[in-house]
Amino acid sequence: MSLMFNGIGVSRGVAVGDAYLLRRNQIDVTSRSLSKKSVPAEVRRYKRALKAARVQLLTARDNIPQDAPSDVSAFIETHILMLDDGVLSQRPVEIIKAELINAEAALQQQREELIKVFGSMEDVYLATRIDDVNHVIDSVLRALDDGAEHVVGSEHWKGQIIVADDLTPADTVTMQHHGVAGFITETGGQLSHTAILARSLGIPAIVGIPNIRRYVKSGETLTLDGHLGMVLAEPTDDMLADVKRQQKETRLRQRELGKLLDTEAVTIDGVKLTLSANIDIEEDLKALKRVNADGVGLYRTEFLYMNRDTVPTEQEHFKVYTKVLRALKGDMLTIRTADLGADKQMDGAVNMRVRPLAHNPAMGLRGIRLCLSDPTLFLPQLRAIFRASARGPIRLLLPMLTNLAEVDQCLKLIEQVKQTLRDENVDFDEKVPVGAMIEVPAAAIAAEQFAQRLDFLSIGTNDLIQYTLAIDRIDDQVNYLYDPLHPAVLTLIKNTIDAGQKSGIPVAMCGEMAGDSRYVRLLLGLGLTDFSMPPNLILETKHTLISCRRSTLKKQVNALLNASTPVEQRAQLDKINASASDN
Ligand code: PEP
Ligand code: MG
């Protein structure tokens, strides 16, 4: 029987594939065949892992405080006994030898056996001991994996739909390398970084389907509609045929849009538009070339800090930036300095610098606050950006600015970096424009003062909406409150665009709203001409905007801003979107 689930569609496109159930930090237990020759080494590896897991338990036992209840050490003793028992110390070894498979797969097979045995026990207490068994087996699997606490890539993911509780941006990138067909997560929101990444990678994705892993099994066929936010498990042949038809339509639409590649981005009444790309990782550069983007409007450098335990060195930053510049062949590269923290949690070294239990990380030490608090994190990146500026046009973009003191502090550090480079006789562009992300309401309200000190502004609607409406962008429970049309949001956007015009500096938008076909006409009517978005949305946006007349949109948008109810406002938006092509 087919089952249907609804969630929040965060990355368009339809996908069909087998489900691959995964938990973040879950250890990969993919089965690998062994040659007879490699069996002794695999058995030794398994025994080493048992030993390591045992040492860990003994250490835990030895560190139990004196005054802890005696149950605590009894609990750990039980786990040590389980490790020593033949069911875990011997049986997996026999399976490795008999079936010529790797230790992880053998242990997993044994786990399934034990689950069956415990599951059939009538004694409720004994039946619940399966949790202990799972815990002990997990610790051995972790030891086999050398203690790594991350999602381990697997070639078996190719063409599969990953179903997880949650995924970090790092997981998403790893999976993309393995050719997954789509993602479904139990938690997460429209603007979580994982969702943004999935959109930018063009992987259909849905978030916010609580407990889906209880109802779907690994290997079961799933279809996923990333626009409607709908998942079908065990679809019928008719349903599958429908998905295939949609995939074909998408391909045809892409081909149609491809004809706009060399069309100039200019409205009917001659307003010249800039349609640039948001890039996160190197892969995005290929996509950017395919759509002929006007350079990069937002390079999220946080990804340089991912999947590693150390902070990238100046030279590493420099190498990556020069590589991106080479690919851009003279087009502008807007590098945003590291916006780490909150939903862009990275691994080891960087996270260590942020208090681990910040109650509200989105309002904590993130973005520019983290960088200003620790120049050893910030200065190598600034130096690398300026050194790279000798190789191609660069703009420097500062994230999460809230007040002018931060702006001044940044400008001072930038001047310091430039002076050191001058002293060292290192080439760089003296005129690298420095801009601010306007993504905190305070900055949007005070946009004019920001504009007077800086060379450009870029509106980050993802955070601006989060902070204006007090909704956590990664929390699916409050996603329904996410509303780019909220009068407060529109007022802040307008205020920022007007401030730029008044001060004579460019204002771009690089939040997701800038590539959302429902809002781009409205933004044009508000005076925005510089849109930056995931590369795969550029041609669609061009298609929409070149058929508009800005002068007409301006009037219609004024009517929308004056609407007194949300219903009236929506009706006005529909009018804007419906009439644009015949303006
Ligand atoms: C934004 O906040 O709109 C933005 C572009 O930055 P990020 O999504 O990386 O926080
Ligand atoms: Mg942001």
Image: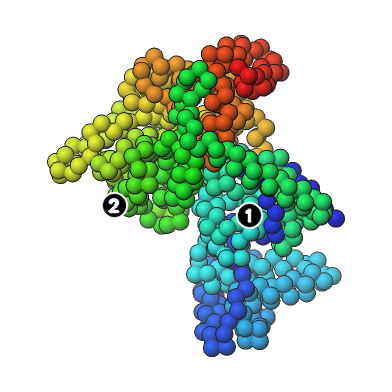
- In the image, 426 versus 248, the foreground residue is 248
Q: Is residue 81 above or below residue 295?
A: below
- Give me the disc on residue 181: 1
Q: How many marks?
A: 2
Instruction: Give the amino acid type for the residue marked by disc 2 in the picture.
Output: Gln
Tell me residue 302's x, y (percent). 43, 45
Name the residue: 68% across, 80% down: 87
Q: Is mark 2 within 8 Å of ligand 1?
A: no
Does residue 470 appear in the picture of this structure? no
Name the residue: 77% across, 52% down: 240
- Give me the disc on residue 315: 2
Name the residue: 68% across, 40% down: 227
Q: Secondary structure at mark 1?
A: loop
Instruction: Give the amino acid type for the residue marked by disc 1 in the picture.
Output: Ala
Tell me residue 167's x, y (percent). 58, 51
- In the image, 333 versus 337, the foreground residue is 333
Name the residue: 50% across, 17% down: 269
